[in-house]
């Protein structure tokens, strides 16, 4: 006890001295301004339960380029269109590395993931090239229009059956299952789920829970990311939880891969889907194909990024329209005028639906699917806006804050699709006031498919049905609470009543 009393002041003095020394060194390094960090833990407590909102509030006081000390890791946050342009375009090469969350290292995911690999990696370039050419190029997308039309038709038929039975539609689940089956049919030539399965224990429900768990875990503030020296301990067990998610996903994918290999060995005709493309691929450099881990994690990336984000976008759009009846009426009036009595919407119709496009943009402004995009890391010490961002700094772009910036948007918290009828804003990373998919070489590669599917599904749901809130929801209002994670989901599923249009 005497020793404790003797050494305690020395420890406190040492910690305080190191803290003051760190502040002095940071000041000399000309870092962007930010809230003063506490000893040892830094600004961890400033994150709160909704970090995208907390950091947006801090940026109002400390500026659009802001430094936080999260444990031992220096983190710079860009929260305005200009600072986002600095990070993603003007100094793109310096910030093109990913800051890999410790949980994403489960099963070596970061060594194979298109989203985590550095651009200098030959594997990253190969995966991007294959996906760009065979999945997301206009030629490839046009070739699969009939597949997307079939999946949307199945969605409409499912909602029609629920409407006939007087049952509420779980909008997110229905759209997720549709997106899931589109991806699985594109990759495996098979559906992974049935829209008419019940929620509890259904393949669609289980698969969405797995994907949702992954995106939520990756977004959880992790002590391993704040203090990398103790990351091997995995104190919050997040890496282990992600490992279990990967094990479950890979078991599903391996079943399809093994079946395809057996079919090939038996001499069956190729299905000419994306799995065939991957199995046939041979590197021009060494003639080697993709190994099993590469296949597993590429398919994992495609499902985790493609199915959930599309479902989240449509669900948020429907929630906003249901609580804004005037906007809902305008969207449906445009559809009636442009589409008329045609039972199905073609993708070629979308460019004529200007108000619907504005609804999608306004939804993405208010509810970007990835509020911080994916974290970047400074490859070199770089000067940005007169400040120094040291090599190794973790860099976040707060797309959510940019969408709510009152200097850029009038009445930023209000749902007003009309704002996009008066100004031309591109979603493809050229206009930095709206960058829900990122920009530059690290832009989401699936953007072309996501844009087509979101517009097509939303337009079809609005054209074929009138929508009403459940009585208790109409009385209390739509719950717009968020569930923070790598993907910004709704805290509670959106349930609504569909009435078929005669």
Image (spheres, rainbow, N blue to C red):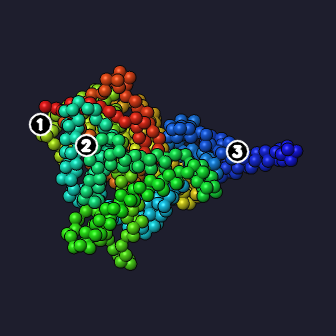
Q: Mark 3 points at which residue?
A: 39
Q: Position of residue 326 (x, y in %)?
A: 28, 26
Do the residues under discs 2 and 1 have CB atoms within 8 angstroms? no
The residue closer to the viewer here, 112 or 115, is 112
Kindly give the residue lying farthest to the front in the view shown: 201
Q: Earlier in the sequence, mark 2 or mark 3?
A: 3
The span from disc 3 to disc 1 (Cα, nearest Å) is 66 Å
Q: Where is residue 346 in the image (x, y as percent from the top left)?
A: 18, 46
Q: Earlier in the sequence, mark 3 or mark 1?
A: 3
Using the image, determine if residue 475 lies above or below residue 315.
above
Badge 1 marks a residue whose secondary structure is loop
Q: How crowded is mark 1: few (under 14 residues within 10 Å), some or many (20 or more)?
A: few
- In the rendered image, residue 386, in percent from the top left (x then y), is placed at 57, 49
Name which residue lies at 55% across and 51% down: 237
Q: How many labels does the image show?
A: 3
What's the mark number on residue 341? 1
Q: Find residue 471 and name its label.
A: none
The residue under label 2 is 196
Q: Which quarter of the figure has residue 337?
A: top left
């Amino acid at each position: 006890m005497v020793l404790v009393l003797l050494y305690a002041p020395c420890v406190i003095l040492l910690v305080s001295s190191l803290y003051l020394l760190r502040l002095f060194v940071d000041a000399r390094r000309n870092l962007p301004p930010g809230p003063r960090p506490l000893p040892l833990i830094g600004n961890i407590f400033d994150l709160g339960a909704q970090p995208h909102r907390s950091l947006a509030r801090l940026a109002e006081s400390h500026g659009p380029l802001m430094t936080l000390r999260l444990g031992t890791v220096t983190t710079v946050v860009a929260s305005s269109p200009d600072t986002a342009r600095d990070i993603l375009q003007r100094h793109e090469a310096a910030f093109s590395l990913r800051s890999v969350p410790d949980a994403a290292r489960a099963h070596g995911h970061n060594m194979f993931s298109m989203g985590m690999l550095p651009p200098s990696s030959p594997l990253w370039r190969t995966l991007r090239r294959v996906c760009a050419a065979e999945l997301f190029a206009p030629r490839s997308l046009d070739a699969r229009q009939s597949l997307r039309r079939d999946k949307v038709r199945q969605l409409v038929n499912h909602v029609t059956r629920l409407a006939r039975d007087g049952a509420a539609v779980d909008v997110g689940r229905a759209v997720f299952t549709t997106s899931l089956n589109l991806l699985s049919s594109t990759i495996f030539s098979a559906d992974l789920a049935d829209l008419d399965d019940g929620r509890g224990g259904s393949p669609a429900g289980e698969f969405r829970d797995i994907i949702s768990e992954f995106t939520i875990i990756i977004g959880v503030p992790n002590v391993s990311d704040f203090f990398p020296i103790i990351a091997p301990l995995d104190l919050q067990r997040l890496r282990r939880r992600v490992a279990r998610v990967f094990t479950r996903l890979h078991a599903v994918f391996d079943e399809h891969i093994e079946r395809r290999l057996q079919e090939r060995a038996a001499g069956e005709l190729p299905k000419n889907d994306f799995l065939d493309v991957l199995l046939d691929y041979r590197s021009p450099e060494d003639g080697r194909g993709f190994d099993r881990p590469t296949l597993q994690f590429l398919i994992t990336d495609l499902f985790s990024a493609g199915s959930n984000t599309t479902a989240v976008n449509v669900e948020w759009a429907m929630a906003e329209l249901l609580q804004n009846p005037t906007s809902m009426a305008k969207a449906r009036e445009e559809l009636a005028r442009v589409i008329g009595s045609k039972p199905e919407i073609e993708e070629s119709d979308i460019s004529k639906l200007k108000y619907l496009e504005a609804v999608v943009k306004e939804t993405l402004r208010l509810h970007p699917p990835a509020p911080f995009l994916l974290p970047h890391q400074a490859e070199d010490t770089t000067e940005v806006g007169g400040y120094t961002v040291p090599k190794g700094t973790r860099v976040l772009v707060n797309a959510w804050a940019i969408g709510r910036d009152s200097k850029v948007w009038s009445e930023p918290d209000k749902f007003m699709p009309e704002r996009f009828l008066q100004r031309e804003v591109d979603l493809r990373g050229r206009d930095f006031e709206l960058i829900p998919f990122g920009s530059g070489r690290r832009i989401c590669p699936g953007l072309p498919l996501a844009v087509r599917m979101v517009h097509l599904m939303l337009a079809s749901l609005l054209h074929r049905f009138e929508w009403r809130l459940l009585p208790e929801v109409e009385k209390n209002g739509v719950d717009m609470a968020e569930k923070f994670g790598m993907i910004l989901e709704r805290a509670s599923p959106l349930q609504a009543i569909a009435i078929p249009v005669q």
